[in-house]
Every structure is written in C-alpha cells, then in structure tokens.
Amino acid sequence: MFLAIRKATDNDTAEVLKVTKDSFSLYQDELHVDYEVKALKETIESTLKDIRENAVFVVERNGGIVGAIRIKQLSPDLWYIYRFGVSPEISNTGLGSALLDAAVTYAKEHGAKAVTLHTNAKYYRLARYYYGKMFYVHSTSFDRGYVRALFVLELADGGADLSPSFLM
C-alpha cells in the first residue's frame, strides 16, 4: 500500500471535494444534525479556489485521495484549519493525524504562533481527538445554530491574537 501526504494540485480538486463531502456526510449522520453543514454545499469552484489560494494537504493511498485538510493564514501569526476529513476506510489508522501534523508543520514553517479550528462541541469523539493533539477550547458560540467550539493549538509563548478566528 503506497501512502503519500502532499499539497493538493488543481488536478486533485474533484477528489478533494469528494472526500470532503463523504467525511462531512458521516459527521452529519453521526450527530443527527438538522442544520446546514457548509462543507456539504461546496462546489468544484470553491474547492479549486482553496487549493490555489490556501494550503490544502491530501493523503493519497494507492493513487487515490483518502483524506484532506485545508489551512489558511488569518494573520502573520495565526492560521486556521477547516474542511479536515478522511474517508471512513482510513479512520483510526493514524493517517488523519499525519495529515493534521503536515498542516500544523506548514503553518509553523510560515510563522504561526497559533492554529485554530472550529467544530461542533457535541461531537465528543472529535473533541477528544483535538484535546489529544494539544488543542484546547478557547470559547463556544451558538451563531450557526449549534454549540460551536473554537479550538486552539498554541505553538509559541504568548500565542497570537485569536480574534480573526471568531469571523470564520
């Protein structure tokens, strides 16, 4: 089984979109939510825009993409993770963690003092996962119709101004 973690290219757009929709459909099913999951409304165009304008990493197995994570710079010292998902076939194999590590390493190499992300605070399995990766809950909001937690990973003493994350 050949595995690679790399930055996505334009040619990966359809597969990145598919793995995003597959993983967020599972997320929606597991939580039994009735609100709109924005990742499920993505298009080829919005996915391609992310690949071109931000950092999108993929995990590739046997020539197909089975996981993706997107990260964007919000300020010189703050980066934001979004649309992180893996195919159910690789869940609990460590490949998602390797993908997360690649995104965090990229942010560090580009001056990040902190990395943030949002997730549903009621998704206990995912919250435990982020705690295990040394993220902590900074705050919660109900602005999207559910309890949305802002998780933070501090990479340097003093951290960063987190306020740009509140707008995400």
Image (tube, grey):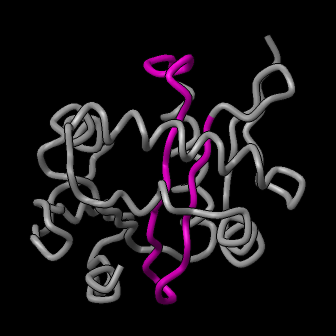
Report the residue at 29% width, 87% height from top: 161
In the picture, residue 145 is in which quadrant?
A: bottom left
Question: Which residue is found at the position 78% from the left and 55% from the top?
Answer: 13
Q: Residue furthest top?
A: 1
User: In the rendering, at what x and y percent does residue 124 appear?
Assistant: 15, 36
Depth check: give the residue in front, 24 or 9.
Answer: 24
In the rendered view of the protein, which quadrant contains the N terminus? top right
Q: Would you identify the image quadrant in which residue 62 lies?
A: top right
Q: Is residue 64 left or right of residue 159?
A: right
Q: Main secondary structure of the magenta part?
A: strand
Q: Residue at x 35, y 66 (%)?
A: 116
Q: Quadrant of residue 137?
A: bottom left
Question: Residue 127's spot in the image, x, y percent?
Answer: 21, 42
Q: Is residue 143 above or below residue 148?
A: below
Left or right of 48 on screen, residue 131: left
**Location of residue 86 with respect to 110 vertically, above or below:** above
Please identify the quadrant where the C terminus is shown: bottom left
Q: Residue at x 46, y 82 (%)?
A: 77
Q: Is residue 149 magenta?
A: no
User: Is residue 86 highlighted in magenta?
Assistant: yes
128 lies left or right of 110:
left
In the image, the segment drawn in magenta is 67-93
In-front residue for pair 49/106: 49
Residue 20 drawn at (x, y percent) = 56, 46
Report the side of 44 relative to 89 (left or right): right
Q: How many marks?
A: 0
